[in-house]
Each structure stands twice: as C-alpha cells, then as structure tokens.
Amino acid sequence: MENLIDTLKAEHQVIVKTLQEVNLLGIGHKAGQEKLLQAKEYLLAHLKKEDKFLYPVLEKKAEKSEEIKELLIRFEDEMLKISQDALDFFKKYKTGCEGFGFAKDYGKLIFSLQNRIRKEEIYLYSEYD
C-alpha cells in the first residue's frame, strides 16, 4: 500500500476530529449520535487497515528483533484495552445521553486515543519505515 503511514496518520486526524464534532453537536441530539456512529466506523476501518498492512510488516521485523517484538507485545496489550473501552463507549452512548457521565467518559476516551495515536506515530510507524 502506497504511503501507508501518511494514510494512517490522516485517518488518526479524521477519527479525533469526528469525535470532537460529537462533543460539539451533543450526544443528546440526532446529529451527535450520527457522528458517534461515524467515528466508530472510522476507528474500526482504521484498525482493520493496521491489522492488514502495518502489523504483518512489523511482525516480520520482530522475527529478527527482540526489541520490536517487545514493542509489539506492549502495543497489542494496550490496544486491546483501548479498543474495548472505545467499543463500550460507542455502545453506551449510541442512543444519546447528557451530563457529567458522558463528559467524563468522553474525556477518558479522547485522552486514551490521542495518547495511543501519539505513541503509534512515534514508535510503531517509525519502525515500519
């Protein structure tokens, strides 16, 4: 896949932007709920693309590098937790909600995703290149 890393980075921006739009529109409104569903679809498509194109290359490199192997194990464990948290969030708020609970869960999700994105772009993507 040509320019995989550029594509993945652009998708990161779209995912975060879409989640920010959910917050601006409000999860209690139909438009906010539709944006939330869109964010979920973007995230799942992004993860699928990473699984198909990024990780096989890194796993091949890990066969010759203990350092890369350990990096992948750490990232996989972390991603399992973040993915489950994100799916729980999408399920919980797909029909809306307002108030402090949403704000708290939203903040936690955005922080987790942005932190993960930063680490992927610094560590994983540089290993791919």
Image: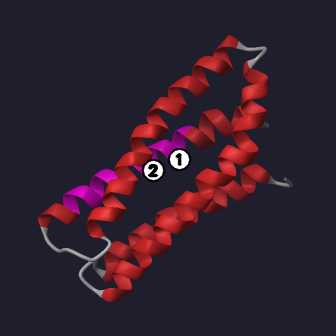
Within the image, what quadrant is residue 8 found in? bottom right
Prevalent SS, magenta region: helix
Whether 80 is drawn above or below 41: the answer is above
How packed mark 1 is, by other alpha carbons closer than 10 Å (few <14, some 14-19, many 20 or more), is some
Q: Secondary structure at mark 1?
A: helix
Amino acid found under the numbered disc labelled 2: Gln
Residue 48 horizontal side relative to residue 74, left or right: right
Q: Residue 20's x, y, as percent?
A: 40, 69
Nearest to the observer: residue 116 or residue 42:
42
**Residue lying farthest to the left in this orientation:** 100
Alpha-carbon span between mark 1 and mark 2: 5 Å
Q: Is the C terminus in the top left, top right, bottom left or bottom right quadrant? A: top right
Nearest to the observer: residue 120 or residue 102:
102
Q: Is residue 21 shown in magenta?
A: no
Whether 30 is drawn above or below 11: the answer is below
Residue 26 horizontal side relative to residue 86, left or right: left
Q: Residue 29's x, y, as percent?
A: 28, 86
The residue depicted at 53 percent of the width and 44 percent of the height is 118
Residue bearing the label numbered 1: 117
The residue depicted at 32 percent of the width and 55 percent of the height is 88
Whether 87 is drawn above or below 96: the answer is above
Residue 47 horizontal side relative to residue 92, left or right: right
Residue bearing the label numbered 2: 114
How packed mark 2 is, by other alpha carbons closer than 10 Å (few <14, some 14-19, many 20 or more), is some
Nearest to the observer: residue 21 or residue 83:
83
Q: Which mark identifies residue 105?
A: none
The residue depicted at 56 percent of the width and 67 percent of the height is 14
The stretch in magenta equals 103-119
